[in-house]
Amino acid sequence: MYDTSDLKKGLKIMFEGGPFLVIEAQFVKPGKGAAFTRTKMRNLLTGSTIERNIRSGEKMPPADVEENEMTFLYKEGDAFVFMDSRTYDQVQLAENLIGDDWRWLKDNLGCQVLFYNSRPIAISLPNFVELQVTKSEPGIKGDTSGGAMKAATLSTGAQINVPLFINEGDFLRIDTRDGQYIERVKGG
């Protein structure tokens, strides 16, 4: 059981009947009245965010969640197939669980898959992936002032903005948290 003094960013707890991830926790001691912890939490099942004040001394059980290292294998219809790196069991994750992260999924990419009561509920990608540019218009020579950008399509089908010097066939490092181009890298 967790006490309110244990609440910190990244902690997974059961709250109001569901698993939650603590995003922010701030201890507050008002001049008058009892101390409490002001929290911001994300529901791991629905993705919704709530803010609650929890009185000091309240107890919360840890969430029954497990994070497994898995490898993305392929997409089959509307499902994404992952393999557990330890047991080699395969799991299909629905498209709605993946969300926009599909843009960064390439074959054999290692990911963390979060399970609640033995059911997959969320995926965490590595912070950076390296993907190849499959389509990009040539940059206009001499138009380099002001950090000009152009659209490029990556091997996964995702479209991002890249600097003008990027060509088809180049490999790029992409930040999966915000989908931004980081740098050009040697062969993938």
Image (cartoon, rainbow, N blue to C red):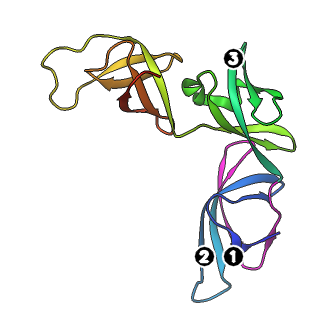
x then y, percent, for residue 54: 71, 71
- Please state which of the two labelled residues, at mark 1 or mark 3, is closer to the viewer: 3
Q: Position of residue 143 (x, y in %)?
A: 15, 21
Give, as a three-letter code, the residue at label 1.
Answer: Ser
**Residues drawn in magenta:** 41-63
Which of discs 2 and 1 lies nearer the camera? The answer is: 1
Q: Secondary structure at mark 3?
A: strand
Which quadrant holds residue 112?
A: top right
Depth check, front residue: 119 or 24 = 119
CB contact under 8 Å: marks 2 and 3 = no
Q: What residue is shown at x 65% (from left), y 36% (from top)?
A: 111
Amino acid under label 2? Phe
Please state the total of marks drawn on the protein image: 3
Residue depicted at 60% across the width and 83% down the height: 29
First in sequence: mark 2 vs mark 1: 1
Which residue, given by chain and number where applicable, does mark 1 sit on?
5
Q: Residue at x 77, y 79 (%)?
A: 57
Which mark is on residue 133?
none
- In the picture provided, is 183 more to the left or to the right than 165? right
Whether residues under marks 2 and 1 lie with C-beta atoms below 8 angstroms apart, the answer is yes
Q: Is residue 139 magenta?
A: no
Observer-nearest residue: 84 or 151? 84
Q: Kindly give the residue lying farthest to the bottom in the view shown.
A: 32
Task: Name the residue tied to disc 2.
Answer: 27
Looking at the rendered structure, the secondary structure element under dot 2 is strand
Q: Which comes sooner in the sequence, label 2 or label 3? A: 2
